[in-house]
Image: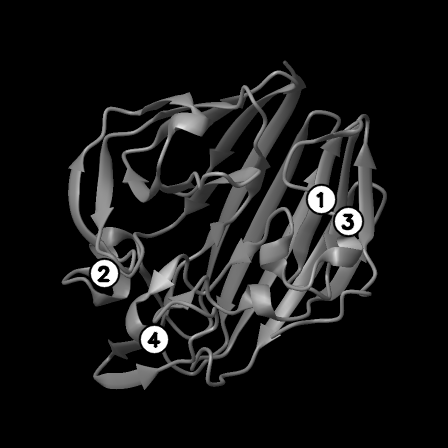
Amino acid sequence: MTLPSSAPALELTSGELRLALLPAIGGAVAGFWRGDVPVLRSPDPATIATARDGASFALAPFSNRLGFCRFRWHGRDHRIVANVPGTPHALHGVAWMRAWQVLESGADSAALRYVHQADEYWPFDFTLEQQLVLTPTALEHRLRFTNTAAEPQPVGLGFHPYFAKRPRSRMHVECAERWETDPTQLPTRKVAQAGIDGDVAHLGFDHCFEGWRGAARIRDEKLSLKLTSSLPYLMVYTPDPANYFCVEPVSHVPNAIHMAEPAAHGLLSLGAGESTEAWMKLEVAPA
């Protein structure tokens, strides 16, 4: 679904940090800057047609790929619509595809809500709220998901920031394992991964990492960043020669719903009326 590129942006500021938010386009962050320096990939908001064109967006009710757009849940088979051309899978849930309602907005904070009614993209009702707060040194982003269906549903959450890649971009992440993938990018098996520490230009990841400890640290010739989250898994995507890379805190392994024990891989079963929350914090300092 493509929403109007003319949709108005909200702008938040605190100290030298500035953020542009597009409620009508997936509730997405359009851009994030320290002074004039992009922290995240930050195109002109007028050029953004979907949340995937911008700086960051929320992932719900699942992150990454749901294999072949079908799943079985509590004895019932469900089929959903493929939402990104070129892949047989469903990607990143539905919240990024829809317009959000602005609940509150101020100089340095905003709260948004998306109300989902069961459709061909996701067969359960839910409400998702996000709050974004800027301080002079950080972006704090929170999600709250509530199951408004009359039955339990599978739930996963995440954050999908696109970091600006510069000539000296470097990443340091402490982790323990990496999920290998098949040709369609579904996970197949875990292998040992003694952390990530290197120039982004020399990395070739599109993988989920387990055993993420502490912060993910990103540094280049302009900025020093520290990413922390309540979520236990980390997706890392370093496409070449793109001008961005992704470091995404997520609650579950991709395609966990098809694994023998989905809960063991982070997927929640959320009962009717129940809620779950997640947060991400991105601290920003000069290099």
> From mark 4 to mark 2, how far is it between C-alphas?
16 Å
* Residue at mark 3: 44
Tell me which colouring the rendered structure shows: one colour
SS class, disc 1: strand
Q: Earlier in the sequence, mark 3 or mark 4?
A: 3
Q: Earlier in the sequence, mark 1 or mark 4?
A: 1
Q: Position of residue 38 (x, y in %)?
A: 70, 33
Sooner in the amino-acid sequence: mark 2 or mark 3: 3
Distance of label 2 from label 1 (alpha carbons): 34 Å
Q: Are marks 3 and 1 in contact (CB under 8 Å)?
A: no
Assess disc 4: are there few (<14), some (14-19) or many (≥20) residues with their C-alpha within 10 Å of its C-alpha.
some
Q: Which mark is residue 31?
A: 1
- Kindly identify which residue carries mark 4: 69
Q: Secondary structure at mark 3?
A: loop
Q: Quadrant of the C terminus?
A: top right
Return the residue at label 2.
262
Residue 160 x/y as whole percent: 52, 48
List x then y, in percent, for residue 41.
64, 41
Tell how many labels: 4
For the residues labelled 3 and 1, the Cα–Cα distance comes to 8 Å
Disc 4 is placed on an element classified as helix
Q: Give whichever of 174, 236 is nearer the camera.
A: 236
Distance between the Cα atoms at labels 2 and 3? 39 Å
